[in-house]
Amino acid sequence: MIRIENLTKQFHGEGETVTVLSGLAMHVQEKTIVSVEGASGEGKSTLLNIIGTVDQATTGSVMVSNREVTSMSEREKEQFRAHELGFIFQHHYLLPDFTILENAMMPLLIQRNSIANAALEAERVLAMVGLAHRLQHFPSQVSGGEMARAGVARALVGGKKLILADEPTGNLDKANSDRLADLLWQLQGDLGFTLVIVTHDPELAARVPIRHKIASGRLTRL
């Protein structure tokens, strides 16, 4: 599913070059759950963004589903994100003026699905995450845990096979964190997607079967 070789990421500014990722290698098999852990500022989210084609590596190779993503054009990256990847964010980023159902439909509408088909698929996935009763509510009308589940549904619509989760429990209390983790593990088992989780939450990380840590720009298997 993911094969990264000799990945380097540098930032340049004010006469200084900062190396965030240095010679990093990572292999992720299909239908697995893996973590990338580390302290704040070590490059966890940068790595996830490079895999997700929203950031560009300085050097190295990143293969996702047998496609070299680092050499894609911007148009190819947009299509790749729309059809292949689902993103789960710490802050959810639900659109406040749209209902939970409409938020979950957005990735499908970007793919130019009809409104009717997008609504049916979004309803199906929202039911899977326990939000069938919240379809017409707005984000301001649901709890933090429900917003997190809506974000999961939005990532999964359309049968995405790679889900990238950036601190998915970062804004939740322990009870909701545990419930979200239980849900992600259940959905991954039922649907068979690959799940890459970036986290500094030790309790969430302890549940992950295949763990990695970033420190000083390098990735090691735990």
Image (cartoon, rainbow, N blue to C red):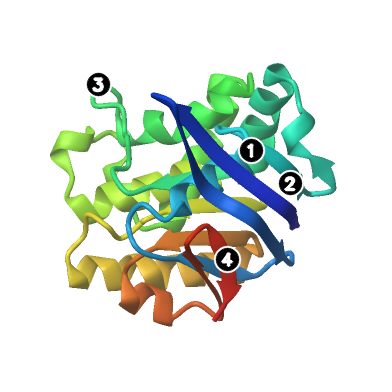
Mark closest to the chain's N terminus, 4 or 3: 3
Element on which disc 3 rests: loop
Mark closest to the chain's N terminus, 2 or 1: 1
Provide residue 161's location: percent of width, then percent of height: 67, 52
Q: Amino acid at mark 3?
A: Asp
- Seen from the viewer's position, the closer of residues 180 and 217 is 217
* Residue tagged 3: 97
Provide residue 105's location: percent of width, then percent of height: 48, 31
- Nearer to us of marks 4 and 2 is 4
As measured in the structure, the alpha-carbon distance from the residue carrying label 4 to the one carrying label 3 is: 40 Å
* Residue tagged 1: 57
- Seen from the viewer's position, the closer of residues 85 and 13 is 13
Element on which disc 2 rests: strand
Cβ atoms under marks 2 and 1 closer than 8 Å: yes
**Residue 108 versus residue 73 in the image, above or below:** below
* Residue tagged 2: 62
Q: Please name the residue shown 49% across and 34% down the image.
A: 11
Mark closest to the chain's N terminus, 3 or 1: 1
Provide residue 143's location: percent of width, then percent of height: 17, 50
As measured in the structure, the alpha-carbon distance from the residue carrying label 2 to the one carrying label 3 is: 36 Å
Q: Please name the residue shown 40% across and 57% down the image.
A: 129
Q: Amino acid at mark 1?
A: Ala
| Residue 188 occupies quadrant | bottom right
